[in-house]
Amino acid sequence: MTTKQQAKILIADDERAITDGLSAILSDEGYTVDVAVDGQKALERLSNDAYGVILADLKMPKLDGLALLKEMQQREIHTECIIITGQATVDSAVQAMRQGAYDYIEKPLNSEKLNRLKALIPKAVDKFVVKQTNRALTSELANLTHYGELTGQSEQMRSVYQLIEAVAPSTASVIILGESGTGKELVARALHAKSDREKGPFFALNCAALPKDILENELFGHEKGAFTGSTNEKQGAFELAHGGTIFLDEVAEMPTDIQVKLLRALESRQVRRLGGKREISVDIRVVAATNKDLEKALADNELREDLYYRLAVVPIYLPPLRERVGDIKLLANEFLIRYSRQNNKKVTGFDDAAWEWILSYNWPGNVRELKNAVERAVIMSRSSTIGAADIVPRHLRASGEIPAVVSVPVGSSLADAKRQLILRTFASTGGDLDRSAKLLGTSTGELRGELSRLLGPNGADGGGARPEKRPVSASPAKAKKEEPKAKKRR
C-alpha cells in the first residue's frame, strides 16, 4: 500500500472555488479527498473517519481553524493540520503551528503556493503514518509478556522492547549494558531477528571466556601455516557472521591490542587473518555487551575510548531483576512450566511461603539465578507445589546471609520504594515477622497487614496472604519443631 493510499485528505473551507480546485488537484495526485464547508462539519468528519491530513482555512463559519485545532488536540485526533490563511492572518497561522499545526499556506493559492502545498502534503502524510505506526506499536508492546526470547511486561522492559524496535532496522552498532544474568544475549538476538539481517548468521563470542591468542584467532581466523599446528585455514567470527550479526559479549574484557584490531575492522569493514596478506571484506552488524561500569573501564583504560564510541552508537540498558520486581512472578511461573515439562514432573505452582521469599529476595544473579533456582526446585520437589524449603538455596538457609540491599531506580514512586524496603527486609530476616517489624520501626500487626496487601493470595499484589512468624526457610511440617532453635540462633 502506498503512502497516498494510507491516508485520506480533508479540505475544510467555506469558499467553493478553493474546495473544488484543491479537490481536483489532489485527486489527480492520487489522494482520496473529502470536503467540509465549515469547522463544525470538519470536526464531525474527523471524529468519525481517519484522515491523514486536513487543509483547514483559518477563517471559517461555526469553528475557525485555531478552534478546530484545539478541539482536535482535546479529542486526541492525530490528523496532521495544514492551515490555509490570508495574508492578514499570518500571525495567527504561526500561532497555530505553535499549537501543533504541521505548516501553513498563504492565500491566494497561485501556482507557486500550490506547488509548495503539493510538496508539503506527502511529508505530512508520512508523519501521520509514522505516528500511527508508533502508537499501534506502543499499544501492542503494552500488552506483551514476551518479546522474542525476552520475558517481561514491566515498564522497564517495555522501554527495552521499544528501543529494540526502533534500532533493529538500522545499521547502527549497539552496546547492551547490564549486570550478568540479565539476558543481554537475548537482546542481541532480538535485534538480529528484527533487522534486515534476520536470514543471515548470528555469531556470539564471549570475549572474557577465551585467552588472548585464542580470542584473536576466533575473531579473525588464520591462514594455513600461520603458526605451529595450523594445518588448515580457519575463518574467524567476522567472516562467519558475514551478512548477519556478530555479538561480542563482555567486550570490555578484551585485551587492548586486540581492541585496536577490532576497531580497525569495524571502521574498514575488512579483516586480515592471522598469517594472511590480503584484506577480506565483511558485511556485518556488531552488537556488543558488557557488565562493567563503563566510566570506570574507560578511566582505567580497560576499554579504548575510540572503540567505545564506535560500538556505542546506540546504548541499551537492560535492568537487573530487582529493578523490575513486577516481572518476577511471570518469569518464575514460566520457568516452572518449562522445567516441569522437561523433567516430566507434575509441579503446578508455589505455596505462599515460597512466593513470599521469591518476591522479596534480591536476586543478585538476576534472571539466570531465578531460572536456576526454579529448575532446582522443580527437580527436588516431592509434591505438586513448591515450598520455601525447595526454592531457598541451602547456603542461604544455613547461614541466613540473604542480601538485604534495596535498589530503587530514579523515577520510582514512593509506593515502589516502600514495597521494596518491606519485602527486602522480610527476606533478609529469613521471614521473621517480629524482627522485620523491629527493623522497620513498626508493629508486627501493621507489618503483617502490609505484607498481606503486597503479596496477595498467591504472591500477587492485592492482599490475602498472611505471613507466619516462622522463618521462611522452614517447611510447614517442621515449623513448630524448628522455631525454638531459630529463635535461639537469633
Image (cartoon, grey):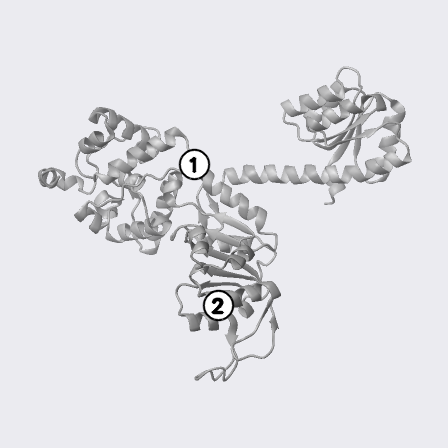
- Residue 112 placement: quadrant: top right
The quadrant holding residue 254 is bottom left
Q: Tell me if 56 is positioned left or right of 195 in this view.
A: right
Position in image of residue 216 (x %, y %)? 47, 71
Q: Quadrant of residue 38?
A: top right
Q: Which percent across, then down, holds residue 232?
A: 50, 82
Amino acid on which the number 1 mark rests in the picture = Val
360 versus 250 height, above or below: above
Tell which of 165 and 329 is nearer to you: 165
User: Would residue 42 be seen by someone viewing this image from the given angle?
Assistant: yes
In the drawing, what numbered circle is on residue 258?
2
- Which quarter of the rendered picture does the C terminus lie within? top left
Quadrant containing the N terminus is top right
* Location of residue 352 with respect to 231 vertically, above or below: above
Looking at the rendered structure, the kind of residue marked 2 is Ile
Residue marked by disc 1? 410
Q: Earlier in the sequence, mark 1 or mark 2?
A: 2
Residue positioned 79% across, 16% down in the render:
61
At mark 2, the secondary structure is helix
Can see residue 464? Answer: no
Q: Are marks 1 and 2 in contact (CB under 8 Å)?
A: no
Kindly give the residue lying farthest to the top in the view shown.
62
30 or 232, which lies in front?
A: 232
Q: Position of residue 374 (x, y in %)?
A: 31, 49
Percent coordinates x, y for residue 459 in the rendering: 31, 36
Q: Residue at x 24, y 52 (%)?
A: 380
- Looking at the image, residue 320 sits to the left or right of residue 247; the answer is left
Q: Nearer the viewer, residue 124 or 304?
A: 304
**Measured Cα–Cα span from mark 1 to mark 2:** 37 Å
| Side of 357 relative to 408 (left or right) | left
